[in-house]
Image (cartoon, rainbow, N blue to C red):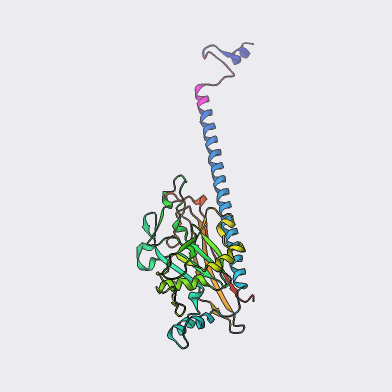
Amino acid sequence: MLLAKRLCYNKDMKRACGGFTLIELSLSMIFIAILSLTVVLLIQNISASYRRGLILNQVNTVGMDLVDDFRISIQNASSDPVTRMCEIYYPLDSADRNNCIADGANSFVSVTKRAQVKVEGKYIGGGADDSYMPVYGALCTGTYTYIWNTGYFENAEGYTGTDVNQREVIGADPAKLGTKAAATASFQTKYEDFRLLKVYDAERTICVNAMRDQNDSWDSTSYVKSGDYKNNKIKNEFVISQEMLDVAEGDEDVVELMKKYDAADLVLYELYVSQPALSSTRQNLFYAASFILGTRRGGINIKEAGNSCKPPSDDYSELEYCAINKFNFAVMAGGK
């Protein structure tokens, strides 16, 4: 009986035997705090992995959709070799025509502007001449023309902790599409602030006029500059005839593809088209191209980071919001 009372109440400690000491309560609270912190960190990691998975999936889905779009446009183009354009725009047996044929009439297929780019206040590649990056351009397939602007024109503004995403293109403004009646006429902007614009252009008018601009003789029909698709003189004002634009608008074929695919935070960092090869058997053009698609966030630097996002060890890597992938495709023209 005395033992039972001793277990139930200890007069010296002045407490019921079923209670806890201050030390016991402190240890319990520390344990609960550690457990809660572990659960929070686990949830954060799971959420970050989920977000990254969604972004990676979006990049891959949109990238494959774009590949299909490019393929269909090229497959539906005329099977006539693009070198026929050389015969249209250059005199017979001229050096210009020979040069045009020698490079596969490449400038009638793809024109690209290159400029220096800063990421996080530093020049990509150190600012050397060979560090010029593609910043905008046009791919003329013979059915539709695609005009693109690099993601380096866009900063990931409005996000917390994204100072590292600040970019700057030196000496170049984003491309825009419009009309121009003659060399002396002013450029009439129709479309701007786009990432990837698709417009019906069966005559490759946009690439032709881009080369005319390089040569400062836009209204000339007898001479078009041939050759270097990397030429830095390409202006950001891509010109199409009003008649062709009316056809495109009537068919609702002027489309901002990045918005079409609901890719609000995805941008192109490069669109490269190699010199088209001529099939020896069918005389059709064979295209090989690639493009780099990624997010605005993550401080992406495709030259320095090797087409990848910053590792978690870097400051402000934002790995869960960053995704980038390179897509390659090859296709033969000849749908007609």
Span highlighted in magenta in the image: 13-26
- Quadrant (top left/top right/bottom left/bottom right) for the N terminus: top right
As drawn, which residue projects farthest toward the bottom?
Answer: 93
Where's residue 76, x and y in %? 62, 72
Where's residue 114, x and y in %? 42, 66
- Quadrant (top left/top right/bottom left/bottom right) for the C terminus: bottom right
Q: Does 258 appear above or below 145?
A: above
Where's residue 236, x and y in %? 44, 64
Figure quadrant of residue 69: bottom right
Q: Does 329 appear above or below 94?
A: above
Give whichever of 62, 135 is nearer the camera.
Answer: 135
Task: Examine the rendering and report whether any part of residue 59 can be seen.
Answer: yes
Give whichever of 114, 15 is nearer the camera.
Answer: 114
Figure quadrant of residue 145: bottom right
**Measuring 44% from the left and 59% from the top, which residue is drawn there?**
301
> Is-magenta flag for residue 22?
yes
